[in-house]
Amino acid sequence: MEITDIKNYMQLVGQQARAASRLIAKAETAAKNQALATMAAAIKRNKQILLAANAQDLEHARTKGLEAALIDRLTLTAKGVDSMAEGLLQIAALADPIGEISGLNYRPSGIQVGKMRVPLGVIGIIYEARPNVTADAAGLCLKAGNAAILRGGSEAIHANKAIAACVKEGLNHAGLPESAVQVIETTDRAAVGELITMQDFVDVIVPRGGKGLIERISNEARVPVIKHLHGVCHVYIDKQANIDKALRIAENAKCQRYGTCNTMETLLIHKDIAAKILPELTEIYYLNGVELRGDPAARAIVATIKAASEEDWETEYLAPILSIRIVNDFEQALEHIARYGSQHTDAIVTEDYTQARRFLREVDASSVMINTSTRFADGFEYGLGAEIGISTDKIHARGPVGLEGLTSQKYVVLGDGQIRQ
């Protein structure tokens, strides 16, 4: 489909989304759940079609010479397709947040005041690679009573369209408007410029992609943005760490997958345990093909570690590269995270309960963890069904953004004839 007038096309998309949002906001829970279940069934039934569409995208990406991290995020597997379907079913199983009234209290005047959870309205999602976002975003926005405008990257256009067909099948089957979830059908970048400035039709923008994309949207958007710029995630191995736990966690946090925002990029190790654990960790990382860059203290223990630069401490590699620093104490670990971290996800490995509690309180990140891998910072793993993204903002939503993050609250007041004196 060739679209020549981007502005008019996007205005039409916006108008349709706004109209659909009013219908979705009042849709019954049963209808939304029926749509989600049908979407999941369609995705499972069309698995081979989705994989074939993704194969087209991958072939094109390799021809264009796209970087390995992007190709990793672009790749759909049979397991990944099943996970998309499972995510939709998990969303269907979650309680519907819309209409929930909380905090209802009587005031001296006799009125009752509380809050009702309501949809945000129309949510625009702009994302690179990751075709699974098409299903996740559609499901979460629908269950939270929102209309969605999805603008995936050109590198995933075939897979996104194939998934969108499954989404439309679900909406139709449940008697909900197709325009409740619209996938932008042009790869023209001008569509993004229109989407992020359509204040009359779009209530929130959620960008998912590289730092360049998110910086552009943050700078140019005239619509509120829920975002994180990058994920410089840390694991700190304390002197009171259990060695076996530390080895498993430090390997998984880096090596389970390289191209994700919750992958560890810097490992901090207390000096009292470094000589004991670093040689074994080095062997593990080298077996996984990970390049290590360390400070002088780390290189004094393992000479094959390359020298880290100042830039390394603040770099999100999204690749098999890891920075390692030996810290003198707990306080220095906190200082390093505060200076170089991106407020995404940071973890401590320790058996010291006091230090663990301090880490939870004092580390300023959207997810803070004790004795587990940073790779768990994910809506699916948190039981949200899926996530629309991870927010490192502090207003409205923070961390993996699931159903609650896609809603707002309004005050409701119940009276029985009272008037203000």
Image (tube, grey):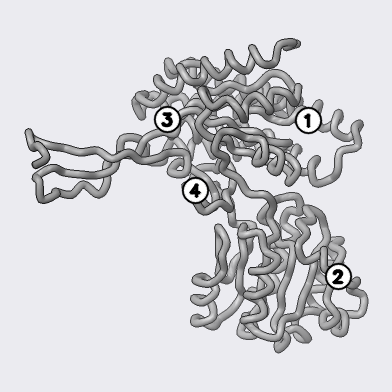
> Could you say whether the residue bearing mark 1 is in a helix, strand or loop?
helix
Asked if disc 1 and disc 3 are in contact, CB closer than 8 Å, the reply is no
Which dot marks residue 397? 4
Residue 360 sits above or below residue 277 on the image: above
> Could you say whether the residue bearing mark 4 is in a helix, strand or loop?
loop
- Residue 73: % across, % down: 74, 42
Among the two numbered marks 4 and 3 on one chain, the one whose residue lies closer to the N terminus: 3
Q: Which amino acid does label 2 sit on?
A: Ala
Query: Residue at 51% across / 77% down in the picture?
Result: 358
- Residue 279: % across, % down: 82, 79
Distance from Cα at disc 4 to Cα at disc 3:
17 Å
Count of numbered badges drawn on the protein: 4
- Residue 11: % across, % down: 59, 16
Query: Given this view, does label 2 or label 3 mark the residue nearer the observer?
Result: 2
Q: Nearer the viewer, residue 16 or 219?
A: 219
> Could you say whether the residue bearing mark 3 is in a helix, strand or loop?
loop
Q: Which amino acid does label 3 sit on?
A: Gly
Q: Mark 2 points at which residue?
A: 308
- Residue 316: % across, % down: 76, 56
Q: Name the residue under label 1.
A: 155
Residue 398 sits above or below residue 60 on the image: below
Query: Given this view, does label 1 or label 4 mark the residue nearer the observer?
Result: 4
Query: Residue at 37% across / 24% down in the picture?
Result: 27
Q: Which of 21 and 138 is in front in this view?
A: 21
Distance from Cα at disc 2 to Cα at disc 1:
33 Å
Which dot marks residue 145? 3
Asked if disc 2 and disc 1 are in contact, CB closer than 8 Å, the reply is no
Among the two numbered marks 1 and 4 on one chain, the one whose residue lies closer to the N terminus: 1
Asked if disc 4 and disc 2 are in contact, CB closer than 8 Å, the reply is no
Q: Is residue 37 visible?
A: no
